[in-house]
Image (spheres, grey):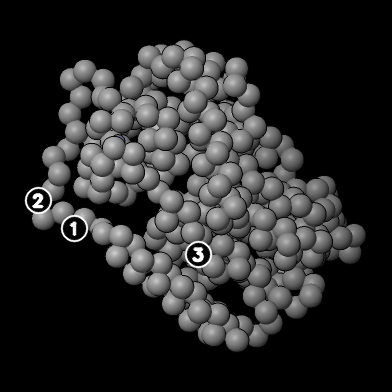
Amino acid sequence: MPELPEVETVARGLRQTILGRRILSVTLGKTDFIDDPAALERHLPGRQIEAVERYGKFMLLRLSAAHSETRAAANGDAAPASLLVHLGMTGQIAPNPPGQPLEKHTHVCMLLDDGRELRYVDARRFGRIAYLTKALLAEELTGFGADPLEVSKEEFAQRICGRRARIKALLLDQTVLRGVGNIYADESLWRAKIHPARLGAGLSRKEAGTLRRVLQDILRKAIVLRGSSISDFLDAEGEPGEYQRHHRAYGREGNNCYRCKTPIRRAIVAGRSSYFCPKCQPSPRRFTMLPLPRGLKIMKEKDNAEARRMLRRGRSKRRSAAK
Ligand SMILES: [Zn+2]
């Protein structure tokens, strides 16, 4: 699932390509992931996209007041509003040039005033789209935790150190911090040398300070590299991210730790697969990790190079297809 860096990457891409455009019409495909499909068709046409913001793991397209001649204005719903876009597991949103054939699983098409179409494609439809008035948006945004890139040292410690939940669960909890998911939780815990199953309340202030610092470092670096592409994440330009090459724990079960050469292990913490180094990240007492699976294929550096080549090949293929 796209986390903060991936969503930020898509939001930045959209900011460069669709800001200021007006939506002329909306065509919907399957709508089971849309809050109120009729509201999209009724209220989006005539509105201008004034801002694209990231909030935790979703995006908000800020929309102008409705155009005066449209029906939306006539029925009294003309005030500025927002379109919430959550990419779920496989969602992609990007502008398409006029006449571009519809990709499979395209469920929302918004015709823009420059002839392009802003399309939302989602094979598994775990995403979510919602048209939100000011009041609905305020309701939607209550209960979220701090943005990890903006949270102060004091607030971070306060949100983590007083809690008797496991640190991995706290990092994933969107009411504690908004935007962190499984990948960046594991990566930051590895970097901070903190075992995912330790309790928030068991962390020293110093450890909490380190965790905040490395989490911010990792998220910033991942944004620069346009996020991690582990399954099929593509940004608004249809490009994969590159941060997966810098993963030090996530998905590396059986591979040697980059610090101490001990094989990375896996355990289920907070209901999720968690990757960690059993030596660098000492476990709490009575904690059991999963045995290394027999016949586990260890990725060698050679395979890593091969993965990079495949990534480049896929990209040039997409580029030539786009021409
Ligand atoms: Zn280690």
The reply to whether discs 2 and 3 touch (Cβ–Cβ < 8 Å) is: no
* Mark 1 or mark 3: whose residue is earlier in sequence: 3
Question: Which secondary structure lies at badge 1?
Answer: loop
* Mark 2 or mark 3: whose residue is earlier in sequence: 3
The residues tagged by marks 2 and 3 sit, at their Cα atoms, a distance apart of: 32 Å
Which residue is nearer to you in this view: 271 or 282? 282
Question: Which secondary structure lies at badge 3?
Answer: loop
Three-letter amino acid code at the position of disc 1 = Lys
Measured as percent of width and height from the top left, residue 91 is found at 50, 60
The residues tagged by marks 1 and 3 sit, at their Cα atoms, a distance apart of: 24 Å
Side of 6 where 17 appears, left or right: right
Determine the residue positioned at 23% across, 39% down: 262
Q: Residue furthest right?
A: 68
Determine the residue positioned at 25% across, 49% down: 255
Q: Which residue is mark 1?
A: 297
Measured as percent of width and height from the top left, residue 26 is found at 67, 68
Q: Which residue is mark 3?
A: 240
Side of 271 where 111 appears, left or right: right
Q: Quadrant of ligand 1?
A: top left
The residues tagged by marks 1 and 2 sit, at their Cα atoms, a distance apart of: 9 Å
Q: Which residue is mark 2?
A: 294
Side of 3 where 44 appears, left or right: right
Determine the residue positioned at 54% across, 30% down: 213
Three-letter amino acid code at the position of disc 2 = Arg
Three-letter amino acid code at the position of disc 3 = Pro
